Image (cartoon, rainbow, N blue to C red):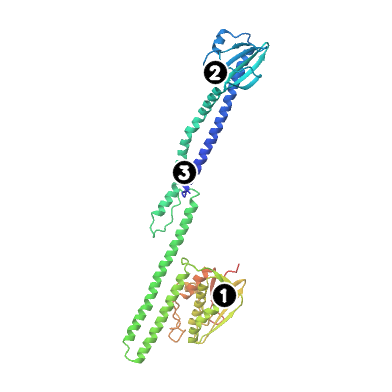
């Protein structure tokens, strides 16, 4: 099977052209053959009729009719059947037949004849059918010859025109082939036919998306490398401090600081991996029906140890039957980050309320905390990666507990966008921040 559009187009056009030429040639051949046969019949009739009113055949006319190169044979009979004239002697001349046109077989040869009766005699003009057919075939073939001569020229013209028509596609293919992996500039749209323009526009849109995706990945890698440098440097310093510890109490403090540093580095790496899996260009898991209330309950269970260490109370009010189509792992990461942020930025001994419900036909996840909240002017910026708020009045007195990675809300926004959800930040009745994730209505 042909895989080239150009080869297919040429094959079909040339096949159609050949069929058309064959059909026209056969039609022309048959028409000319029929017309030539009719012309020969007309000559037979006219010759017989011209002799009908002639009393006698003049010697000059008789000698002309007797010429061996003359294909027609003239015979005249009297009314009683006696042969009174023959244009030339022939052993196998057709006998007298019915009046009008007739095909007569004599001695293995077929004659075409025309007979007419006059007063006192019968005139018959005959011609060998083989000669008639030969002359008719030659005339028909001459009529077809121009078409046979033009057909190859038309095939060459079609090949040339198809080649010219595919030049824009070849130009686009050459332009794409000549690019390297870093070249994502749009392809030119000038001088492209209407059929090719949508394809190039789609390619340009794909290149634009790839450029944006690669740019985001490069920025992510750069930011991740920068953010990992600080905790790793801190770990190295804490290990050095541990080695220089002189007594057990100093060594215990260094171990506590090292453990806290490892915990922060671990959480940063986990959040970086979660964010990377949620990127638009990453391989996405298959969607499934998720019970949002049960999923949030499991996510809060992972946050309970951290909340207990701060004396924070976690409350969940989950309505039954709140389901949606989504990526279970990504949605769990969204819920954990919201709960972790709420606990981290709330004062020790406070409350964090989490609600799951159907609101206006849409699944809704709501998290309220009693922390310092976020000023309205900063509520867009907190969704940026690695953006950290300076919170000095939350935690164990030195703000250590409120020190985050700057990725929690970025993960929430990214996962929410994947699921068609809208994330909003408002003031909470508890005095802190309310985060609402409103998913698209089911169905």
Q: Nearer the viewer, residue 247 or 82?
A: 82
Residue that mark 2 sits on: 71
Q: Nearer the viewer, mark 3 or mark 2?
A: 2
Q: Are marks 3 and 2 in contact (CB under 8 Å)?
A: no
Tag 3 secondary structure: helix
Residue 49, above or below 32: above
Q: Position of 164 compared to 119: left or right?
A: left
Residue 370, above or below 377: below
Q: Position of residue 363 (x, y in %)?
A: 59, 73
Q: Position of 384 compared to 436: left or right?
A: left
Q: Position of residue 171 (x, y in %)?
A: 42, 49
Q: Position of residue 175 (x, y in %)?
A: 41, 52
**Residue at x 50% of width, y 49% of height:** 195
| Residues packed near mark 2 inside 10 Å, few (<14), some (14 to 19) or many (20 plus) | some
Tag 1 secondary structure: helix
Q: Earlier in the sequence, mark 1 or mark 3?
A: 3
Q: Position of residue 360 (x, y in %)?
A: 62, 72
**Residue at x 56% of width, y 27% of height:** 33
Q: Earlier in the sequence, mark 3 or mark 2?
A: 2
For residue 88, what is the image quadrant?
top right
Q: Nearer the viewer, residue 270 or 10?
A: 10
Residue 220, above or below 427: above
Q: Earlier in the sequence, mark 2 or mark 1?
A: 2
Residue that mark 1 sits on: 292
**Residue at x 46% of width, y 72% of height:** 275
**Residue at x 48% of width, y 55% of height:** 201
Residue 196 has which mark?
none
| Residues packed near mark 1 inside 10 Å, few (<14), some (14 to 19) or many (20 plus) | many
Between marks 3 and 2, how big is the CA–CA gap?
Answer: 53 Å
| Residue 374 in sight from this viewpoint | no
Residue that mark 3 sits on: 162
Tag 2 secondary structure: loop
């Amino acid at each position: 099977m042909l895989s080239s559009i150009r080869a297919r187009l040429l094959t079909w056009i040339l096949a159609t052209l050949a069929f058309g030429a064959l059909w026209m040639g056969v039609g022309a051949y048959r028409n000319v053959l029929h017309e030539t046969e009719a012309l020969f019949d007309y000559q037979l009739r006219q010759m017989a009729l011209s002799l009908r009113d002639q009393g006698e055949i003049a010697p000059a006319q008789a000698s002309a009719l007797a010429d061996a190169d003359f294909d027609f044979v003239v015979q005249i009979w009297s009314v009683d059947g006696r042969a009174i004239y023959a244009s030339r002697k022939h052993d196998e001349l057709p006998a007298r037949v019915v009046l009008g046109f007739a095909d007569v077989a004599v001695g293995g040869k077929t004659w075409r004849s025309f007979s007419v009766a006059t007063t006192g005699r019968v005139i018959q003009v005959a011609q060998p059918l083989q000669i008639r057919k030969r002359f008719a075939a030659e005339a028909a073939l001459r009529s077809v010859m121009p078409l046979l001569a033009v057909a190859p020229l038309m095939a060459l013209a079609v090949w040339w025109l198809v080649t010219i028509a595919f030049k824009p596609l070849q130009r686009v293919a050459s332009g794409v082939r000549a690019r390297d992996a870093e070249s994502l500039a749009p392809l030119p749209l000038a001088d492209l036919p209407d059929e090719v323009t949508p394809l190039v526009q789609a390619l340009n849109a794909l290149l634009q998306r790839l450029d944006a995706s690669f740019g985001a990945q490069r920025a992510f890698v750069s930011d991740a490398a920068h953010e990992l440098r600080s905790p790793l440097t801190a770990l190295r310093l804490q290990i050095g401090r541990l080695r220089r510890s002189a007594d057990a109490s100093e060594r215990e403090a260094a171990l506590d600081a090292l453990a806290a540093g490892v915990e922060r580095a671990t959480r940063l790496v986990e959040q970086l991996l979660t964010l990377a899996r949620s990127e638009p260009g990453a391989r996405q898991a298959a969607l499934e029906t998720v019970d949002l209330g049960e999923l949030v309950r499991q996510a809060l269970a992972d946050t309970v140890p951290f909340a207990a260490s701060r004396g924070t109370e976690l409350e969940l009010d989950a309505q039954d039957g709140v389901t949606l189509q989504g990526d279970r792992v990504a949605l769990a990461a969204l819920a954990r980050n919201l709960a972790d942020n709420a606990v981290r930025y709330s004062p020790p001994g406070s409350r964090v309320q989490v609600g799951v419900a159907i609101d206006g036909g849409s699944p809704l996840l709501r998290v309220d905390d009693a922390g310092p909240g976020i000023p309205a002017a900063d509520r867009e910026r907190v969704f940026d990666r690695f953006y950290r708020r300076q919170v000095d009045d939350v935690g164990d007195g030195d703000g250590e507990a409120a020190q985050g990675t700057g990725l929690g809300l970025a993960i929430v926004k990214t996962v929410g966008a994947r699921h068609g959800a809208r994330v909003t930040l408002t003031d909470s009745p508890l005095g802190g921040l309310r985060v609402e994730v409103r998913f698209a209505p089911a169905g």
